[in-house]
Amino acid sequence: MERKGYIVSRQFVKFFIPTIMMTMALSMSIVIDGMIVGNILGPEALAAVNLVLPVTLIFNSLYVLFGVGGSALYSVALGRREKGRAQQFFTAALAAMFAASLLVMAGGLFLCGGIADALTGNAPNLTELVYDYLRIVMLAAPLLVVVPGLVYFVRSSGNVRTASAALITANAVNLVLDLVYIGGLNMGIKGAALATGTGYFIGLLIAVYGALHCETLKPAAVSIGAAVKLLKEIAATGLPNTINTVLNFFRLTCINAIVMMYLGSSGVTAFSVCTSCLSIVSMFVGGSAQTMVPLLGTLYGEGDTRGVHFTVKKAACITGISTLILLVLFEIFPGQITGMFGVSDAGQTAVAVEALRIYAWNLPVMGILFVAMCVYPMLGFRKLSSCIALLEGFLFVVPMAWLLARLLGPAGIWAAFPAGEFGTLLILFLITGRIRKKRPHLHGLFLLEKEQRKNVLDVTMIQEISQAVALSEKAISFCMENQVPEITANKVGLALEEMAVNTIKQKKNERKKSYMDVRITIGEDHICISVRDNGAPYHPFLPENTAGDFDNIRMILAITDEAVYDNILGMNSSIMKICI
């Protein structure tokens, strides 16, 4: 009997599909939105929308900084059973997103004319279109910042379906109203911006509904001093992803300039194909990494070392396999993939095929680095995560593209991407190697803690009565081996057996095989018994569940000094403590 990853894997899969749908909704809506605007209003309107995209990067940066950072710390606090602190992280992050978005809205409306002039310096014919679109986008700034940020918290509370429904609905409404406002009501480019704002307002209603139905997503009283400390911690955790988001824009701008220098418009078309393919890859890479974050935070907060291992391994495997499959597809079918993006000219196709085949080699390494960038802040290595974002986001790729283009010609531009990723990975190996020498209890590229100490028993049992009895005997032997008094050891075995039997009774009508994770930790003055399953929510320690036939629970309450229950991320989690 040993610890297995069945429960963690099932929860990962449960979160993975909705998270992929969320990522897909965000990625594909941008592409389809552009297609609708371009086909109805023409290429000038499409160009105006694209010119405003760098401004919307501010919105993305704010919800990534506070939403991603805050929800990660919220998950860790839930894992530690610090519900009050989890609510404080939620309150501080939500207030920061709302306040920052109001400032951006006010500043954007005041400077709207100047921004439009700056964005269209070389194309004055687009100034009026950009102004009309930008003004409404700025009015929608609070929605475009708060809704995605709130969705991260709703997902981290375990309500992943509502979280995904909020973003999917917001973007679906946006696309439908594009047709209504632009095509039906003839509102022009203003209609495109208004459709975005309306869609995200509907998404807000769904996200708020999800938050209201979660106990830990309620505002908490936080003093100004405490709020400042919380926001510093939130910003430090969300900073790596924010850096990655911001630098991605500068990287694309610089690479486009280098491509134009060597290949002209054909090269820009080829690079557009590569970046569009990257959006497809991001669905799987971002989906697996973002699925991992709430699970990893909760398990890390609980001190569940093996659970952390299983979660990171699952994310790394999905990311690695998906990027390898896409690499093979891009290498075998580059012409067909290029054709999917409307590239038909023979010269442009030849450039795009070469670009895609070389560019694709960066995908597997990029995936692993992104997983690492999400893991490190959760484990306390925030600077290391920011280092990855800086290196692969700009410092390696752009100089290499310039240098390799001079040495190898156009092919050197595309080679800069895999070279940059491999260079970042090499630096990461060197840094993590030094960290492991200083901290021998860590191992691997992800700097995970090694297996549990001798005073921890960590197992997974099949939910059968015979397994419950065997586990009880194993627990008693484990306690005795660690010099726990016999009477206390027997209490641990009895409490564990009664809890397991009670859980099995609740699942007696289920056909599929069910499992239970059990972790016993011997402390200085008490023994902690943690029991987890992913069945239907059931609070065993409520008064109404301790009467009648539930003798198991009454026995547990009688022999333990503390017994608490939580349902975290869809998993029943009970903790019992017995003083030594």
Image: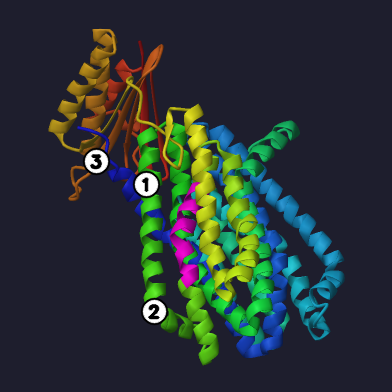
Badge 1 is on which residue? 313
Q: Is residue 473 above or below residue 227?
A: above
x and y percentages locating residue 316 in the rendered image: 40, 51
Residue 231: quarter of image = top right
Residue ID for mark 3: 515
Note whether residue 410 is visible. Answer: yes
Q: Alpha-carbon neighbours of circle 3 within 10 Å: few (<14), some, or many (≥20)? A: many
Give the structural element (helix, strand or loop) at label 3: strand
Q: Quadrant of the N terminus?
A: top left
Is 532 on the left or on the right of 346, as rendered? left
Q: Which residues are magenta?
A: 358-374
* Most frequent secondary structure within the magenta stretch: helix
Q: Tell me the SS state at disc 2.
A: loop
Nearer the N terminus, badge 2 or badge 1? 1
Viewed as shown, does residue 423 lie left or right of 300? right
Which residue corresponds to mark 2? 333
The Cα atoms of the two marked residues, 3 and 1, are separated by 20 Å
Q: CA distance from mark 2 to mark 1?
A: 30 Å
**Residue at 46% across / 62% down in the picture?**
363
Mark 1 crowdedness (10 Å alpha carbons): few <14, some 14-19, many ≥20: some
